[in-house]
């Protein structure tokens, strides 16, 4: 049975020959991507997330090849968010130590050593979250030794709240949706002298979200090393949310591959499709309401202004799909065709494959996305079973049983 889905082509997408340019480099740069990779790869427990090749599924979907970047094991946090929030926390604390001690530079290794525990321990970081970003900020706070308060909206599951609290953060509920929680976190932080570590930028708040986004670029750097030499993907499907991950990967690949960069497709839930509607309108559009979707990490109604600066020209197309496609993708990855590995993907992690399934069902979507039998498609498996209870309910087995 077909689910509901729609797709649009971005009428003002930059042509493939257009250089990345100085204006975009002022937002996201090669130097800052390299700095994030150097710092994060020095942390205890760092390992590149695997890139799986799914040949049987590619054949079933009429594609030349299909790749899935599996972020489930990232630093034990279950999602790519570990790369961004914790990196921004480290940079916040480095700046505080440099200011307090008059030092020209401080590394995260020095923070980890406990050498500046007095300065670090007096700081509090905070953010709003649908689950995964807050977990990363809480983990970063615990790793480097500062205090942490995380705000969740009323639709965040208890499992995701518990996963944040496990890292020592205080978790507070805000009535309303994700965007309400963002505003409440900002107001509370201002009143208490805390530092907001958000992946959402807004007027006057850009530096920290840029750290978050450059941290996400580690994923793109790993993918570039893991793909067959000389054969970048022709298409990338990236989950949006506020757009931070999508913009980071888009920028990184544009810098790396230039005119050979992939076509970039943004994927969102039907009722939380702020990037889709912004591309359609040619300017940022806010989506209101409950933003209710099983794809919890994508329940965002307002695109980050920094992400928009990259995506308004860097995204070639957008897809909005109902929850049924994300759930089908989770089950399909857990029950692979012969020869493909079993993959544990959460509701958000399955969104990219969900868009491919929509293209399978709707020829007009396949045409809009310019998919054909020679397409080499990359999916960003942004999360694993970040809520194990929901995962078991959807798939019928635990992650351990799927991987066994």
Image (cartoon, grey):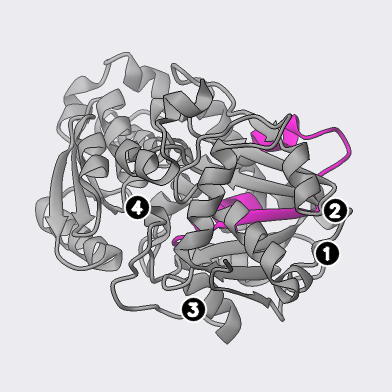
Residue 178, percent across and down?
Answer: 29, 63
Picture layout, residue 203 above or below residue 298: below
Numbered range of the magenta stretch: 221-250
**Res 37 seen here:** yes
Q: CA distance from mark 4 to mark 2?
A: 32 Å
Residue appearing at x 38%, y 36% in the figure: 86
Residue appearing at x 30%, y 77% in the figure: 289
Residue 57, percent across and down?
Answer: 72, 44
Question: What secondary structure is found at the residue carrying circle 1?
Answer: loop
Residue 260 is tagged as: 2
Question: What secondary structure is found at the residue carrying circle 2?
Answer: helix
Q: Mark 3, residues whose alpha carbon is within 10 Å: few (<14), some, or many (≥20)? A: some
The reply to whether discs 1 and 2 touch (Cβ–Cβ < 8 Å) is yes
Q: CA distance from mark 3 to mark 1?
A: 23 Å
Q: Earlier in the sequence, mark 4 or mark 3?
A: 4
Residue 198 is tagged as: 4
Question: What secondary structure is found at the residue carrying circle 4?
Answer: loop
Q: Earlier in the sequence, mark 1 or mark 2?
A: 1
On whether residue 324 falls in the magenta region, the answer is no
As drawn, the residue found furthest toward the bottom would be 281
Q: Earlier in the sequence, mark 2 or mark 3?
A: 2
Q: CA distance from mark 4 to mark 1?
A: 31 Å
Q: Earlier in the sequence, mark 4 or mark 1?
A: 1
Residue 284 is tagged as: 3
Horizontal side of 366 relative to 45 (left or right) equals: right
Q: CA distance from mark 1 to mark 2?
A: 7 Å
Q: Earlier in the sequence, mark 3 or mark 1?
A: 1
Q: Mark 4, residues whose alpha carbon is within 10 Å: few (<14), some, or many (≥20)? A: many
Question: What secondary structure is found at the residue carrying circle 3?
Answer: loop
Q: How many marks?
A: 4
């Amino acid at each position: 049975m077909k689910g509901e889905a729609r797709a649009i082509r971005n009428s003002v997408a930059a042509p493939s020959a257009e250089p990345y340019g100085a204006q975009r480099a002022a937002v996201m740069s090669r130097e800052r991507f390299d700095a994030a990779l150097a710092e994060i790869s020095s942390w205890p427990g760092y390992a590149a997330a695997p890139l799986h090749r799914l040949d049987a599924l590619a054949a079933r979907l009429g594609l030349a090849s299909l790749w899935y970047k599996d972020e489930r094991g990232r630093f034990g946090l279950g999602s790519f968010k570990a790369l961004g929030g914790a990196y921004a926390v480290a940079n916040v604390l480095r700046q505080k130590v440099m200011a307090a001690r008059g030092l020209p530079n401080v590394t995260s290794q020095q923070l980890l050593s406990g050498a500046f525990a007095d300065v670090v321990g007096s700081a509090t970081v905070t953010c709003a979250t649908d689950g995964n970003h807050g977990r990363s900020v809480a983990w970063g706070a615990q790793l480097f030794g500062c205090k942490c308060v995380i705000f969740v909206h009323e639709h965040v599951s208890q499992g995701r709240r518990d996963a944040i609290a496990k890292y020592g953060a205080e978790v507070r509920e805000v009535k309303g949706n994700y965007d309400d929680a963002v505003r409440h976190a900002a107001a509370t932080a201002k009143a208490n002298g805390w530092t907001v570590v958000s992946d959402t930028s807004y007027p006057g708040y850009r530096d920290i979200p840029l750290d978050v986004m450059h941290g996400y670029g580690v994923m793109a750097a790993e993918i570039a090393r893991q793909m067959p030499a000389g054969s970048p993907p022709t298409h990338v499907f990236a989950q949006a949310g506020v757009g931070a991950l999508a913009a980071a990967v888009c920028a990184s690949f544009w810098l790396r591959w230039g005119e050979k960069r992939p076509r970039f497709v943004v994927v969102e839930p039907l009722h939380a499709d702020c990037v889709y509607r912004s591309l359609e309108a040619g300017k940022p559009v806010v989506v209101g309401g409950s933003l209710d979707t099983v794809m919890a990490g994508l329940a965002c109604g307002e695109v980050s202004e920094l992400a928009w600066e990259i995506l308004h020209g860097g995204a070639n197309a957008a897809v909005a799909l109902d929850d049924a496609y994300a759930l089908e993708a989770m089950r399909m990855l857990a029950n692979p065709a012969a020869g493909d590995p079993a993959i544990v993907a959460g509701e958000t992690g399955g969104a990219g494959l969900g868009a491919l399934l929509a293209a399978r069902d709707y020829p007009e979507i396949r045409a809009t996305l310019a998919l054909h039998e020679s397409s080499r498609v990359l999916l960003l498996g942004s999360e694993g079973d970040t809520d194990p209870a929901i995962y078991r309910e959807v798939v019928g087995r635990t992650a351990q049983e799927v991987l066994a």
